Every structure is written in structure tokens, then in C-alpha cells.
């Protein structure tokens, strides 16, 4: 089955009972048992729900894993994966991970003495040098936010195998349509499905897919024990989002290339961060490990004042956090998504006051470019 067909036919696609072409929304908490302990496979919806199961089966197939799991948010998914570890274990993470993941590790899970180090995972040498005796996992994000740094997933898988670590990849930015970390050696892949997979700015959700039956059992045990599950309505909305993921990612890709090249030649833009540009340091690795570069572009207009001017003038870009939707979004990381990161740390990471981040949508590229052109003027 080719990729676009897979997005329509993978997983559970309808209802065998009635022939309904859309998976029904099983808005139910409990299930009648024939005799005590003798049930049809479902007993209680925290443990399993048919609509959620359809979604979980579908994402598992799309990421080429053994099993999938749906959670109430990306952070719920990440937290549940972290429940695989115990106090005194140590996790190595990409240094510019999503702000919520940074907060989870440094302000919540540290209370349970789950130890961590942030490291530049674009540099395999630094990763190897940071491994400790108690290191249990390598947690990476690629591309990263907002500077679109690229980590070599295969190289990380080699390091993980050598040191007996789990390799966990946050695949939110690339989506399984462009990048399949399990095929490159990762053990666990996870998503904020709030972004591209949902795709319409109308759901908050998280997904996890694992490579082995053993991890599937462990994550299901945690999902059922902790209970951070996704409800049936939102599971259904994600199934619906997945049907058009291929079309959306293709359209976003085409638009993003045009916009990145437009920004690159613009005299008022000093730097453009987009892995699809040949001068991006992660271009070659990105080309090898992903089939597309995605829809996130950051660019520097020199100062907070100039950034404010651009934001005030755009018509088709909505000023908002989040990303991955059909509508184009624009934000200033230093004052929005990354405001909680101390100034010094922001400087180290290269998140300047004049940095603007856009999430390219599926509007007509010409309109988006004209909009940026007049806003930058
Ligand atoms: C948004 C995001 C998350 C968190 O997901 P929520 O659905 O907002 O909880 C995690 N990782 C990345 C890369 C994200 O963009």
C-alpha cells in the first residue's frame, strides 16, 4: 500500500456491525458482561474504548509500530512515557525540547528524583559524553522548536543500542507522513496530536507508538493505571484529521518551500531557519531521514520592535501559540512559547527578540507571500 492510500485505509476504518464508513463514537464508560469476568474485550473505557482503539490501531500502523496509545494531551503522553522510569534513573534530552517537556522534567519529575541532562543532540559526541551509569533513555526532538535543529535519528539509535538506552522521539513537527523514527531504530515515538495530526486547531491530544510487545504491555499498564486517556469524541476527531494528513502535509510542504525562499532573499530578514534550505546545518541529515521538511519556519527581523510591526500588519497569519493547523499561525517565541526560559538561556539557544516563527498553513502561497512582503516593507 502506498503512503497516501495508507492514510485512508490503515487501521480501523469503519463499523463492521452496521457498515458505517466512519468509526462510531462510542460514548460509553462501561460494558455489559455476559457473566462475571466474561466480556467482549471491553470492560471499562479507561482500560479500552472502541473509538480510541480504532485511533490507536491506526497510528500504530502509520508509525509502523506494534501498538499505539492515545492520551488527553501531548504532555499527558510524555508524562506517561516517563512513568516507565523510576527515581535515580537518568534521561538525556535534546537541549531545546518543547517548553512543556522542559518544565515537566525540571519542575515536576525532578521532585520524584528522575534525573535528567539537556544536551545538544545534533552533536553525537556530546551525547556519548553525557551518558552516565544510570542513564536509561535518550529523548530527542527533531526538528526542534523554534530553530529547527536536526538530530540524526539513526546515529542516536546506534548510541542507544550501544549503551542499552531506550530511544524516544517526539515526532510532532515531522509527523509520520514525513518521518518514521521506529524505522530508523527508535523504540518509542510520540506526538502532540494537537498539532499536525489533529490539524484544525480544535483538539488537544497526545499519541504514543512503541516498537515491541514488551513496551506495549508496559505503556498500556501505565495508561490504564495513570488514566490520562483521550476521550471518544476527540479520538474520532483525530481519526478524521488523519484522513487528510497526507494532503495537508503535501500542501504545507509546497507552501513552506516557497515562503522560505522568499524570506531568504528578503533584505530585511537576517536569518531564515528552515531545514529545507541547503544552507541549514541539518539539511543533509534531514533529507536522509525524512521525506519532507515540514511547515515550521523561523526568521530574524533584527529587533522586538520590527517583529511587533510585522505581527501588527499580517492579515492571513493568526497571532497564536501552537502550530500544525490548516490556517497559518505566527508567533514571537521569546515573548510567547519560550517566555518562561530565562533570558540568558534563550541567548545561548539563539532565540533572539527579533525571531518570528511561522506555522505555514494550506492557504494559497501567493497570498501568504504577499502578506509577508507588505508586512516586512
Ligand atoms: C505542543 C507540543 C507538545 C505538547 O503537546 P500538548 O498537546 O500541547 O500537550 C510536545 N511536544 C511538541 C514538540 C509540541 O509542539
Image (cartoon, rainbow, N blue to C red):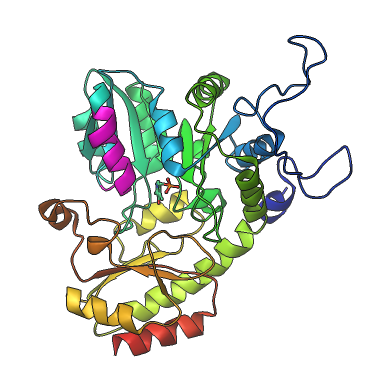
**x, y percent for residue 85:** 36, 21
Q: Is residue 257 above or below residue 66?
A: below
**x, y percent for residue 11:** 71, 40
For the question of whether residue 159 can be seen, the reply is no
Q: Front-most of 36 and 321?
A: 36
Is residue 109 highlighted in magenta?
yes
Residue at image coords 33%, 86%: 375
Left/right placement of residue 341 relative to residue 286 reads left
Residue at image coords 44%, 53%: 173
Q: Quadrant of residue 317?
A: bottom left
Q: Front-most of 280 and 40?
A: 40
Left/right placement of residue 164 relative to residue 219 reads left
Residue at image coords 30%, 57%: 337
Q: What stretch of residues is rendered in magenta?
A: 96-110
Q: Quadrant of residue 158?
A: top left
Is residue 311 highlighted in magenta?
no
Q: Is residue 167 above or below residue 251?
A: above
Left/right placement of residue 172 relative to residue 298 reads right
For the question of whether residue 349 can be seen, the reply is yes
Q: Front-most of 375 and 125?
A: 375
Q: Is residue 342 above or below residue 355?
A: above
**x, y percent for residue 163:** 32, 22
Q: Quadrant of residue 18?
A: top right
Q: Quadrant of the C terminus?
A: bottom left
Q: Which SS type dominates the magenta stretch?
A: helix
Residue furthest left as drawn: 344
**x, y percent for residue 367:** 49, 85
Q: Front-most of 109 and 348?
A: 109
Amino acid at each position: 500500500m502506498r503512503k497516501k492510500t495508507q492514510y485512508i485505509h490503515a487501521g480501523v476504518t469503519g463499523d463492521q456491525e452496521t457498515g458505517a464508513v466512519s468509526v462510531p463514537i462510542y460514548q460509553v464508560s462501561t460494558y455489559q458482561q455476559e457473566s462475571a469476568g466474561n466480556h467482549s474485550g471491553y470492560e471499562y473505557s479507561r482500560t479500552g474504548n472502541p473509538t480510541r482503539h480504532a485511533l490507536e490501531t491506526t497510528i500504530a500502523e502509520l508509525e509502523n509500530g506494534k501498538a499505539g496509545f492515545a492520551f488527553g494531551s501531548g504532555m499527558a503522553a510524555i508524562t506517561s512515557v516517563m512513568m516507565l522510569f523510576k527515581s535515580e534513573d537518568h534521561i538525556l534530552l535534546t537541549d531545546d525540547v518543547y517548553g512543556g517537556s522542559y518544565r515537566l522534567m525540571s519542575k515536576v519529575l525532578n521532585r520524584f528524583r528522575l534525573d535528567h541532562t539537556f544536551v545538544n543532540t545534533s552533536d553525537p559526541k556530546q551525547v556519548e559524553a553525557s551518558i552516565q551509569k544510570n542513564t536509561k533513555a535518550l529523548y530527542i526532538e527533531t526538528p526542534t522548536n523554534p530553530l529547527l535543529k536536526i538530530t540524526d535519528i539513526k546515529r542516536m539509535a546506534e548510541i542507544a543500542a550501544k549503551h542499552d538506552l531506550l530511544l524516544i522521539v517526539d515526532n510532532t513537527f515531522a509527523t509520520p507522513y514525513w518521518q518514521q523514527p521506529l524505522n530508523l531504530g527508535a523504540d518509542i515515538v510520540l506526538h502532540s496530536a494537537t498539532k499536525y495530526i489533529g490539524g484544525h486547531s480544535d483538539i488537544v491530544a497526545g499519541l504514543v507508538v512503541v516498537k515491541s510487545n514488551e513496551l506495549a504491555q508496559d505503556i498500556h499498564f501505565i495508561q490504564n493505571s495513570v488514566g490520562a486517556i483521550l476521550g471518544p469524541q476527540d479520538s474520532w476527531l483525530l481519526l478524521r484529521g488523519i484522513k487528510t494528513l497526507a494532503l495537508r502535509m503535501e500542501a504545507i510542504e509546497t507552501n513552506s518551500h516557497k515562503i522560505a525562499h522568499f524570506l531568504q532573499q528578503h533584505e530585511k530578514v537576517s536569518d531564515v531557519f528552515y531545514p529545507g534550505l541547503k544552507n541549514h546545518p541539518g539539511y543533509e541529515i534531514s533529507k536522509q531521514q525524512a521525506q519532507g521538511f515540514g511547515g515550521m519556519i523561523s526568521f530574524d527581523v533584527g529587533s522586538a520592535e520590527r517583529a511587533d510591526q510585522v505581527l501588527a500588519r499580517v492579515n492571513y497569519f493568526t497571532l497564536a501559540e501552537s502550530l500544525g493547523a490548516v490556517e497559518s499561525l505566527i508567533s514571537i517565541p521569546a515573548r510567547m512559547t519560550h517566555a518562561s526560559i530565562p533570558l540568558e538561556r534563550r541567548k545561548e539557544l539563539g532565540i533572539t527578540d527579533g525571531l518570528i516563527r511561522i506555522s505555514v498553513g494550506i492557504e494559497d502561497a501567493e497570498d501568504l507571500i504577499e502578506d509577508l512582503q507588505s508586512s516586512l516593507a
